[in-house]
Amino acid sequence: MTNDFQIEPLVSVKWLNNHLSDSNLLIFDASMNKVTSNENEIESSQIPSTQYFDIKYVFSDTNAPFPNTVPSEEQFTIEAQKLGVNTDSNIVVYDDKGIYSSARVWYLFKALGFNNVAVLDGGLPEWKAKAYEVEVKTSNPKPKGNFIAHYNPEAFKFFKDIQESSENSNHLIIDARSENRFKGLVEEPRNGLRSGSIPNSVNIPFSNLIENNCFKSKDDILKEFENVETKDQHLVFTCGSGITACILAIGAEIIGKTNTSVYDGSWTEYGTLTTK
């Protein structure tokens, strides 16, 4: 595995196709349904040797009151080892939307002490567009791994942190939801959740970073961040439930911003626990 994999958050489908036989490569499918979409068709094919990475029911705290909450070190260690993750593994994660939930897996691994992970740029749609080989979905189990998670407490923000960040001029909260959701012009897709946004936050819809299923150029991503006048502040990314906020985290890393974190509960938590 080349060093560029270790320092870049993205790999191309061409790169992955050329490295499918690498002995220490693990490929994870992190596909999950969008809460904003009624399209729940299950993809019947996958990239060869793929294992399913279940964000919602395996790699989250299912006892938490809000969805997709970061799991404990112990839980992440146990479940990652089940997928064969070793300390020297190289991980590529993708999803069936192009760029969507795969970013959350990238962020989870980084937050829990594993850096040699990358998102497949364009995901399964791009893989298929290039007519690379697919297989019928199967589990592809691997021997138990030896990776042990070490949580970085700076990676995630929680409700009390966000209340402080909202009033801190050295922090900038950036919301990845659509403009209409950010402005409270449409109802939230989750039943009973009020519309609106976190006070003093700004908006970069995650879709602004993506074109034809892939991330836009570094220059285009930089323009999106410049539009909301990010300076040397600590950037806190939020969204509906902590999934697409991680797309902004990848964008930030692409343009060299490392002083960042993700609000784990995002608007689902904030909108529930506040009235304005």
Image: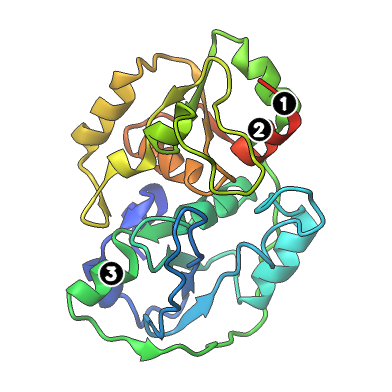
List x then y, in percent, for residue 127.
Answer: 26, 72
Q: What's the residue at 62%, 18% (across, down)?
A: 165
Tell me which corner region of the image, top left, top right, bottom left or bottom right, holds residue 242.
top right
- Assign a secondary structure to mark 3: helix
In the image, residue 58 sits, relative to residue 275, either above or below, namely below
Q: What's the residue at 60%, 10% (across, down)?
A: 168
Q: Check disc 3 and report the residue beneath it.
A: 125
Q: Residue 73: in sight, yes or no?
A: yes
Which amino acid type is marked by label 3?
Pro
Tell me which corner region of the image, top left, top right, bottom left or bottom right, holds residue 71.
bottom right
| Nearer to me, 34 or 156 | 34
List x then y, in percent, for residue 67.
Answer: 67, 52
- Assign a secondary structure to mark 1: loop
Structural distance between the alpha carbons of marks 2 and 1: 5 Å
Q: What's the residue at 47%, 66% (across, down)?
A: 91
Mark toward the start of the polypeptide (3 vs 2):
3
Q: Which mark is residue 271?
A: 2
- Asked whether the beta carbons under mark 3 and mark 2 sit within 8 Å of each other, the answer is no
Question: Is residue 172 shown left or right of residue 193?
Answer: left
Q: Residue 146: in sight, yes or no?
A: no
Question: Is residue 131 shown left or right of residue 189?
Answer: left
| Nearer to me, 94 or 110 | 94
Structural distance between the alpha carbons of marks 1 and 3: 38 Å
Which amino acid type is marked by label 2?
Gly
Callout 2 environment at 10 Å: few (<14), some (14 to 19), or many (20+)? many
Q: What's the residue at 23%, 81% (across, down)?
A: 132
Callout 3 environment at 10 Å: few (<14), some (14 to 19), or many (20+)? some
Q: Check disc 1 and report the residue beneath it.
A: 274
- Asked whether the beta carbons under mark 2 and mark 1 sit within 8 Å of each other, the answer is yes
Mark toward the start of the polypeptide (1 vs 3):
3
In the image, residue 141 sits, relative to residue 6, either above or below, namely below
